Every structure is written in structure tokens, then in C-alpha cells.
Image: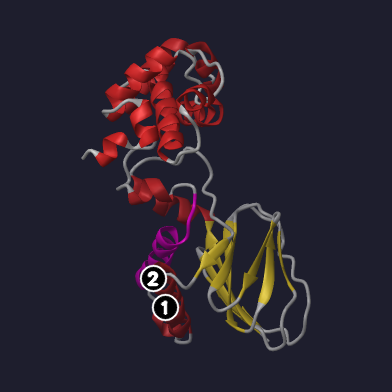
Amino acid sequence: MLFATQTPELTIGYVQPGRDLRITPRLENTTYHINFAWQGRLHARSGDTDVEVQGTSASVHNVGAEHALHHWDPDTGVVGIKLSRTLVEHELEQLLGVPLEEPLVFESQFRLDTASGRSWLRLVRLLLTEFNDPAAFEDRRIREQYIRTLVVATLNAQPHNYLAQLRDGGHPSTPRTVRRVVAHIEQHFGGSLTVADLAAAGGTSVRRLQEVFQDQFGMSPMTYLRDVRLQHAHDLLREGRADVTEAARSSGLVHLGRFSAAYRTKFGELPSQTRSGIARRGR
């Protein structure tokens, strides 16, 4: 059993093969795919990720990603949705208020047992009901409003690489250079790093790196690095996973005297007090 309705921005259809088979959609770069089980269960593979598609879990396949539907249980029926890449990216840019700096990438598993997931599923069921009445979609404005509502609901319900920024109110995104340097710091803060190393990681000059960090964080890149190191040391001490010397050295803070002074300025107590709990018991 197979049926589908198609517009330039949305394709939505239902398939119930009645047997196990493997469906491998044609690889293309213009749509995002979502599949959920109307009844039964199957598996969906997207790249290296395998998702069980059933009542509480759908699969999402990104633009250009190889994917397949397989291991269908008997009588399984699946609703497949294809959303235009152009429309999805346009709606996201409208929500953020800035152009996208990198491709939108959704997580492969779509949880339908969350509040936002259940809301999304109700909206899709409404759309399917409306599609049964062809006259409902003859008016282009009504059709576009339904589809845009679905796109916005998907962007808010399903995790992706812009979701934190979206939930933060759509503030302008951090320049790509800064993101690269922050990622490099988070991965290598325990080692020896200079501002030149950080500039190289960001693919920029030291002067430009200083400017963008000051603009984004109100501090220099080396001050940012120091704060990351201090926070890591603080976490180790608070959780009792290291003594003061171990916490400092594993965090890339090799001068213990400077470490203690900077630590006290940031956290209001000495590292040894955090480790022993004296300060907390005295409050």
C-alpha cells in the first residue's frame, strides 16, 4: 500500500509493504527526510546510525545523507515526510535573525515521547487529515502556512546544531573562528598553549583573534583559556577526584602559586578549601 501528496516544499506519504524489505531512497541534496511508524516497527539507518522507528521514536535523515529503511515488522505502516532544504534553512534563518554559517544537521533519532515530540506528532496527524480534503490545499496561502508551521515545529522539537542558539533567542551566532578556537581549548586545555597556537587553530591572526574574543566574551583568548582550566580544576577538587597539585597540573596550570591566587579570585576560596570542604562546612 502506497500513497503520497506532494507540493514543491513538502512530500508526505504512507507506505505499508506487508512484508520485510529494504528501501534505499535516492541520494539527493534538496530535502530532509523524517519517517515515523503509524503502526508496527522497523529500523532506519542514516549514515552510521541505526534508529528503531516505532511509536515513540522517529528517524531523521539529513540532506545528502545515505539512508535506508529495513527490518519491517509485519503490518508496519510508515509515514514519510520530505521537507525542502531551501524552506527549512530559510525558516531557521528567519528565527535566528542571521544567515547560517554551516549546514543544518539534525540528530538521527527523533523522540516522540517528549512534550515537543508529541506536539509535533499531533500537528502531522492534523496535516494528514487535511490532505484527505484536497480543497483544503487549493489556497496557496493556507497550504504554505501549514507547511511553514510544520517546519518551525520540527526546528524547535528535534535537536540540531543550531538548537541552543535558537532557544537562546536567536542571538547572532559566534563567528566560526571563535568556535574553532573554543573547541581547540576544550580539547587541549591540559597542554601547553600560546595565543599563537590558538590563532593557528582558528585560522586567523593573533590580532584578529584578540579582537573577536574581546567582542564575543569581553576577555582575551588566554584569559578564556585560564578560566576553562580553573573551572576544570574546580570540578576535580569539588568531586574529590584529585588533590590540589594533581588538579592544577591536569588542567594545564603548572605554577601552583599563581594557580592558588587565580583560583581564590574566581571561586572565593583556596583550592585546598574546596578539596577538604572546610569552606562549605563553615557556611
What percent of the width, then of the height, locates residue 68? Answer: 72, 65
User: Was residue 148 drawn as part of the magenta stretch in this picture?
Assistant: yes
What percent of the width, then of the height, locates residue 122? Answer: 42, 78
Near-viewer residue (165 or 244): 244
The coloring applied to the image is secondary structure
Q: CA distance from mark 1 to mark 2?
A: 11 Å
What percent of the width, then of the height, locates residue 220? Answer: 36, 18
By secondary structure, the bulk of the magenta-drawn segment is best described as helix
Instruction: Evaluate whether residue 168 shows in this view.
Output: yes
Cβ–Cβ below 8 Å for labels 1 and 2? Answer: no
Near-viewer residue (210 or 145): 210
Q: Residues within 10 Å of mark 2 (few under 14, many from 20)?
A: few
Near-viewer residue (148 or 167): 167
Tell me if 137 is positioned left or right of 252 in this view: left
Near-viewer residue (221 or 60): 221
Q: Which residues are magenta?
A: 141-160
Q: Amino acid at mark 2?
A: Ala
Q: How many marks?
A: 2
Residue at image location 43% in from the left, 23% down from the top: 225
Look at the picture and state if 90 lies above or below 150.
above
Residue at image location 57% in from the left, 59% down from the top: 32
Quadrant of the rendered structure where residue 78 is?
bottom right
Residue at the disc numbered 1:
122
Residue at image location 51% in from the left, 29% down from the top: 180
Q: Quadrant of the C terminus?
A: top left
Q: Quadrant of the N terminus?
A: bottom right
Q: Amino acid at mark 1?
A: Arg
Which numbered dot is residue 115? Answer: 2
Quadrant of the rendered structure where residue 58 is?
bottom right
Q: Residues within 10 Å of mark 1 (few under 14, many from 20)?
A: few
What percent of the width, then of the height, locates residue 82? Answer: 56, 65
